[in-house]
């Protein structure tokens, strides 16, 4: 087996594909997508189909004890190089003392996969954490930030020999968000729809396959606000008011808050006249991504940006029912857009 180490998702997958295994994979975090990808790959590729009946075990943390997991892991494989033990819902284990002992001396012929979702190992259990790291891989699967979604989409498609333009990327990111399971499912649907002779995703493809209008979407709304295009912004808001399933205040508020929060930060960039400098200051993936912030710096003063951020927070509270007995979400959105643009 490979030497135990702590690595990224991509590194873990590369080692698994090269059949470089470690005795323990402790997979934890708030993003279930990566946890499922790793555990599913191990379940489907370590053993041959005919070896799995006797050498692959799936347990649930709510149904077993740490001692029972350790006992299962200490068994020897039957007519196979490895046995695989996968523990789902590992976050439900009450007492981990028996596992800590196992981690200190794991079986080299066992691949134990602990799937700990919706949280991480208690940081106060330092010896437990150390024992996991000594035995194998401790991997935290974190939720992607909004700014990380476009490169995730681009890379996901690139690995499947599909290209995509920046506008389509942003439309998908804004409309679907950081639920990676849903996001990849939608991307797979888009990939299947593409003809072999044209493997490129365009706004029209996004509209046809995902159902997000290429003209009336979060990307176009932000673009209208950035450029202070009052007519277009009101067109889009009217469309959303008449087509609630196309978008709502609950999805747009985080997008607008993120933009104006970053725009406020851009005012403190060492050289805010330089697109490259602003991109670096905001830790954007490319100077191109700073284009909207350069436009925003021209169209909105620092004082106005601070006021807009305050207004977004006020509208957010009202949308959740605070100090707002009866104003519908559509009216709140119109109020916010009017405030931003005037």
Image: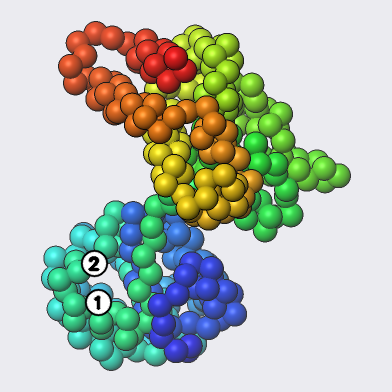
The residue shown at (49%, 42%) is 182
Q: Residues within 10 Å of mark 2 (few under 14, many from 20)?
A: some
Q: CA distance from mark 1 to mark 2?
A: 7 Å
In the depicted structure, whether residue 297 falls above or below residue 325 = below
Q: Nearer the viewer, residue 80 or 195?
A: 195
Residue 249 is situated, as x and y percent measured from the top left of the image, at: 39, 22
Residue 275 is situated, as x and y percent measured from the top left of the image, at: 60, 47
Secondary structure at numbered mark 1: helix
Residue 340 picture quarter? top left
Number of marks:
2
Visible in this render: residue 89? no
The residue shown at (39%, 52%) is 143
Residue 263 is situated, as x and y percent measured from the top left of the image, at: 45, 38
Q: Which residue is mark 1?
A: 129
Q: Nearer the viewer, residue 295 or 283?
A: 295
Secondary structure at numbered mark 2: loop
The residue shown at (41%, 82%) is 5
Residue 27 picture quarter? bottom left
Tell me if 172 is positioned left or right of 137 in this view: right
Residue 290 is situated, as x and y percent measured from the top left of the image, at: 57, 44
Q: Say whether disc 1 or disc 2 marks the residue closer to the N-terminus.
A: 2
Q: Nearer the viewer, residue 261 or 301?
A: 301
Visible in this render: residue 39? yes
Tell me if 67 is positioned left or right of 147 in this view: left
The residue shown at (53%, 55%) is 280
Asked if the residue under mark 2 is in contact with the one under mark 1, i.e. CB atoms within 8 Å, the reply is: yes
Q: Which residue is mark 2?
A: 121
Q: Quadrant of the C terminus?
A: top left
């Amino acid at each position: 087996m490979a030497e135990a180490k702590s690595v990224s998702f991509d590194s873990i997958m590369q080692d698994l594909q090269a059949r470089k295994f470690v005795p323990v994979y402790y997979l934890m975090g708030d993003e279930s997508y990566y946890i499922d990808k790793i555990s599913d790959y191990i379940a489907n590729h370590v053993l041959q189909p005919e070896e799995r009946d006797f050498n692959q075990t799936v347990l649930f943390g709510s149904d077993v004890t740490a001692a029972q997991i350790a006992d299962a892991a200490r068994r020897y494989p039957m007519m196979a190089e490895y046995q695989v033990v996968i523990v789902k819902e590992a976050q439900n284990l009450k007492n981990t003392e028996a596992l800590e002992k196992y981690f200190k001396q794991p079986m080299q012929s066992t691949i134990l996969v602990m799937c700990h979702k919706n949280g991480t190992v208690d940081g106060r259990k330092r010896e437990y954490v150390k024992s996991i790291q000594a035995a194998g891989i401790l991997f935290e699967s974190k939720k992607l930030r909004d700014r990380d979604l476009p490169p995730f989409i681009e890379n996901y498609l690139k690995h499947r020999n599909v290209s995509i333009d920046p506008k389509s990327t942003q439309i998908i990111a804004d409309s679907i968000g950081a639920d990676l399971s849903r996001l990849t499912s939608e991307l797979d649907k888009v990939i299947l729809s593409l003809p072999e002779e044209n493997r490129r995703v365009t706004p029209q493809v996004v509209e046809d396959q995902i159902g997000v209008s290429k003209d009336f979407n979060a990307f176009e709304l932000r673009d209208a606000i950035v450029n202070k295009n009052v007519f277009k912004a009101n067109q889009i808001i009217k469309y959303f008011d008449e087509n609630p399933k196309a978008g709502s205040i609950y999805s747009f508020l985080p997008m607008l808050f993120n933009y104006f929060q970053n725009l406020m930060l851009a005012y403190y960039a060492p050289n805010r006249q330089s697109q490259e400098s602003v991109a670096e200051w905001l830790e954007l993936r490319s100077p191109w991504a700073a284009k909207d912030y350069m436009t925003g710096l021209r169209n909105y003063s620092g004082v106005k940006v601070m006021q807009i951020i305050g207004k977004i927070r006020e509208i957010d509270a009202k949308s959740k029912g605070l100090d707002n007995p009866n104003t519908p979400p559509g009216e709140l959105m119109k109020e916010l857009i009017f405030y931003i643009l005037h």
